[in-house]
Amino acid sequence: MRKSFVVMTGRHKGKTLALAKECVVIGRDPESDIRINSTEVSRRHCEVHVRGDHVIVKDLGSRNGTFLNGEAIFSEIKMLPGDTLHVGPMIFELAGKKKQVKKSASEEDVVDWLADDGPADDADTTIVSNKQAETMNSESAAPLTPRQAAVSIEPIEPGTPAAEAANVIQNFWSGKNS
């Protein structure tokens, strides 16, 4: 099946461009397969490779970048039907049947879930203090041990750069608290 782009911007909006070769060069150069006459587009801006059923886009070190679905690309990346390719002022959409993607939860949805005033089912979660945990019957033979600090703090040797830095920081914060 032949792959094609639908032009989404400019005076050719809505037109279809067939990707007739295995490697299509997009750029400002008159030798480009898809020529975009804009100073925002490099002479050889990007390549579009058709490999069987796959379409791969590769930026060619363009000055203003190549974007797939609004995100800059820095290496070869696969395009899916419905994906948009942004080259300078032009936007191309890869034609084809779009796959249905499940919509992820919005920030509002997450806030609503966290603020839900409904009844809580905490049957599987119990919060206890360390003291309470010590008195519980545990089937595990391992004793409860307090967490150890991952970093040990050694005294600063006077006259070292670390001591000077500590004094600067201490003087700064003591001035803030006054």
Image: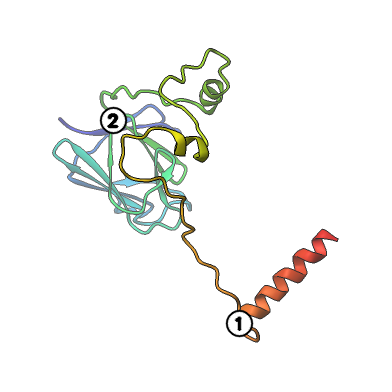
Q: Residues within 10 Å of mark 1 (few under 14, many from 20)?
A: few
The extreme right residue here reads 178
**Rendered image coloring scheme:** rainbow
Write down the residue under mark 2. 81
Asked if residue 146 lies left or right of residue 139, the reply is right
Residue sitting nearer the eye, 39 or 46:
46
Mark 2–mark 1 Cα distance, whole angstroms, equals: 64 Å
Relative to 45, residue 137 above or below: above
Task: Please state the horizontal and vertical placement of residue 158, each as a whole percent of the image.
Answer: 65, 84
Write down the residue under mark 1. 157
Asked if residue 39 lies left or right of residue 138, the reply is right
Helix, strand or loop at label 1? It is: loop
Q: Give the quarter of the image for residue 69.
A: top left
Task: Please state the horizontal and vertical placement of residue 88, each as a whole percent of the image.
Answer: 45, 46
Relative to 142, residue 158 above or below: below
Helix, strand or loop at label 2? It is: loop
Q: Amino acid at mark 1?
A: Glu
Q: Residues within 10 Å of mark 2 (few under 14, many from 20)?
A: some
Image quarter hosting the N terminus:
top left
The extreme bottom residue here reads 159
Write the residue at 40% across / 57% down.
62
Q: Amino acid at mark 2?
A: Pro
Task: Please state the horizontal and vertical placement of residue 145, each as a whole percent of the image.
Answer: 43, 49
Q: Give the quarter of the image for residue 87.
A: top left
Residue 174 — which label? none
Relative to 114, residue 73 above or below: below
Image quarter hosting the C terminus:
bottom right
Which is more N-terminal, label 1 or label 2?
A: 2
Asked if residue 32 lies left or right of residue 11, the reply is left
Write the residue at 33% across / 24% down.
101
Residue sitting nearer the eye, 62 or 10:
62
Task: Please state the horizontal and vertical placement of residue 125, each as a whole percent of the image.
Answer: 44, 26
